[in-house]
Amino acid sequence: QVQGRPVLVKLYGRKRTRFPTLARAFGHRFLVAKTGLSARTRRDTDARILGLWRQHGFAVPEVLDLPLPEPDDRPFLVLERVDGATVRSELRDARFPIARLEAGLTRFGAEWCRRHALAEKLREPGLIHSHPGFEHLIDRDGEWVSFDFEYAYTDPRRVETLVAVEIAGFVASLQRAAGKRADALLRVLVAAYPDRDRL
């Protein structure tokens, strides 16, 4: 609770020792064309991408201008707390109503297509999720909220290719998570995505 509001405090630390971070950062920036690996860069990327997606009406947590509940030297964001299960956990649960999954995939497919079209129009690689998968969506009472934007693509010349990579990532995630229901749910997702040429 910060100022009486439930929040998520996200702290960014070093994931590896300095030399492996520097070695991996070279490939990340120049081979894969993604943002940097330092804690501060990951925080700044998260904040920028969350703002970009919200600006265009996509469901992501809001970044809040609130202080930390207790001091910490690490880079941080204070985020709106989004309550709910991950969509991957719902896909994996054979008892979860398939009608609710179908409704969610129908909404997701339409918004997914709108986001891809906008990324291509604006030449904005930040509108493409660099970690595509249903584990990065929270079901908030039927609204699927995206999260995990510590890394982002940076090359506007590759937007179409990156869209294809994201599509493949979500399809693979659906196949892994949904088990025997995957084929039926994939048909729902394809039907909900209006741009068949891109798909």
Image (spheres, grey):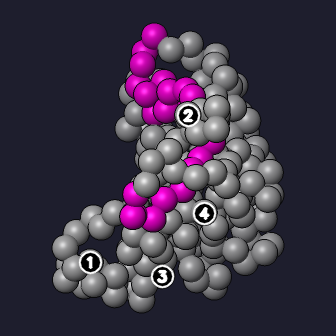
Residue highlighted by disc 3 = 33
Q: Which residue is mark 4?
A: 47
Residue at 80%, 58% (x, y): give it: 56
Q: How far across and how far down the image is residue 85, in percent?
A: 50, 27
Quarter of the image for residue 116 reads bottom right
Badge 1 density bin: few <14, some 14–19, many ≥20, Cα 10 Å: some
Dots 2, 4 in contact, CB < 8 A: no
Q: 150 or 183: which is nearer to us?
A: 150
Q: Position of residue 163 (x, y in %)?
A: 61, 65
Distance Cα–Cα, label 2 vs label 1? 33 Å
Q: Earlier in the sequence, mark 3 or mark 1?
A: 1
Residue 136 falls left or right of residue 196: left
User: What residue does disc 1 label?
Assistant: 21
How far apart, in angstroms, are the residues tagged by discs 3 and 4?
Answer: 19 Å
**Badge 1 amino acid:** Thr
Amino acid type, label 4: Ala
Q: Earlier in the sequence, mark 3 or mark 4?
A: 3
Is label 4 in a helix, a strand or a loop? helix
Q: Please tell me which of labels 3 and 2 falls first in the chain.
A: 2
Bounds of the magenta segment: 72-95
First-in-chain label (2 vs 1) = 2
Disc 3 residue type (three-letter): Ala
N-term mark: 1 or 4: 1
Residue 159 can be seen in this image: yes
Find numbered disc 1 in the image and state the secondary structure of the residue it sits on: helix
Q: Is residue 114 above or below residue 160?
A: above
Q: Kindly indicate whether the residue at mark 1 contacts the one at mark 3 (C-beta within 8 angstroms).
A: no
